[in-house]
Image: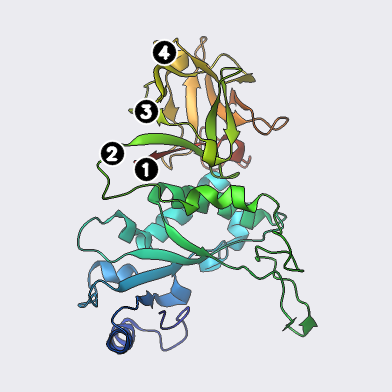
Amino acid sequence: MSMRNELRGPNQTRPAWYRNVARGAQTIHKANPNALVIVSGLSFDTDLSFLAQSPLRNNYDNKLVLEAHWYAFSEGKRQEWAEKPLAQVCPGSAERFDARAGFFTRRVNGTVPLFVSEFGGDQRGTNRADNSFLSCFMAFAAERDLDWALWALQGSYYWRSGVEGFEETYGVLDSGWARPKYPKFREKFRFIQEMIQDPRSSTGFYQIIYHPPTGQCLAHDRENNVVVLRDCEGRARWRYNGEGDPILLVSNATVCLRLVGVGQPVQVSEKCDDTQSFWRVGSSAGFGLIGEYANGTELCMERDSADASLVLTRECICRHGSACSDDPRHQWFKIISSNIV
């Protein structure tokens, strides 16, 4: 049970927060000891940073849960998502979210669980700021294995803002509530719906190569011996030990990913001992996979614009400097560790 949505206003102070949250949580727990007690942060539920130094004293028999919200418009940043270089805006936004709330997902022992109880964007796919934000959010969500709730399901309202049948552009459903507004909604969000990392599992970790803008994963096309993007249900498992190592296929550790030239598909090859089979992550934010061609040219994995399932290597976008204004999302591949069988 959540006590209050998006706390804000002149009376939102930390002393008032601690006092009222403790009273409300105790009231809920006393009335129903089995109910989860969900606690919202300050500033429209974007700030829980103060709990890093002064946590709540009671976890209510492990029923306490923290919630946070994250949108393109959080902190008044929508215009930045629309106009500023994405290579700069995404890492900056992720760092701020991590400092204000996301740090709870990095704690292992003695912590309180966090879920992002609201995020979302225009499901029509026409809003540049929301499209950019969602790509960034989905990368963060996969990497941290976030629990989340999406705003919103409804496609329209009986009456809102003086308009009958007002459309909810963030709604999953169309205005008639008949089908998803975005036709590939289930495929796009499927991967981050799954449990990706199980802290109770004794299974070793392997890697998934994820493309957040589409929600798809790298898979092995055995017929053509190349890699393609597919629904993450059909994803391949990879083994990658770090910078400058080959990316090996778990099901056959004698083969690896190999680049063969500019504009050419990434191959699955038995030749894994030279620079064309060695890969490194493209940025400090973990986006992009870079290989080196025979003449020393750096090439990046890229989703082909002509054949959306094909993965090629091309010249790296925004490789040197976050001020680059090009859209790098075709090359936003991210390595995600998982231990789920």
Distance CA(mark 1)–CA(mark 3): 16 Å
Q: Which residue is mark 3?
A: 240
SS class, disc 4: loop
Q: Quadrant of residue 10?
A: bottom left
For image coordinates 57% across by 47% down, the residue present is 86
Horizontally, residue 315 falls left or right of residue 114, namely right
Q: Which residue is mark 4?
A: 272
Distance CA(mark 3)–CA(mark 4): 12 Å
Distance CA(mark 3)–CA(mark 2): 16 Å
Q: Name the image quarter holding the C terminus.
A: top left
Residue 230 spot, x, y in % from top left: 59, 36
Distance CA(mark 4)–CA(mark 1): 26 Å
Q: Which residue is mark 1?
A: 340
Identified by mark 3, the residue type is: Tyr
The crowding category of the residue bearing disc 4, from other C-alpha atoms within 10 Å (few below 14, some 14 to 19, many at least 20), is: some
SS class, disc 2: loop
Q: Which residue is mark 2?
A: 203
Label whose residue precedes the other's in the sequence (4 or 2):
2
The crowding category of the residue bearing disc 2, from other C-alpha atoms within 10 Å (few below 14, some 14 to 19, many at least 20), is: few
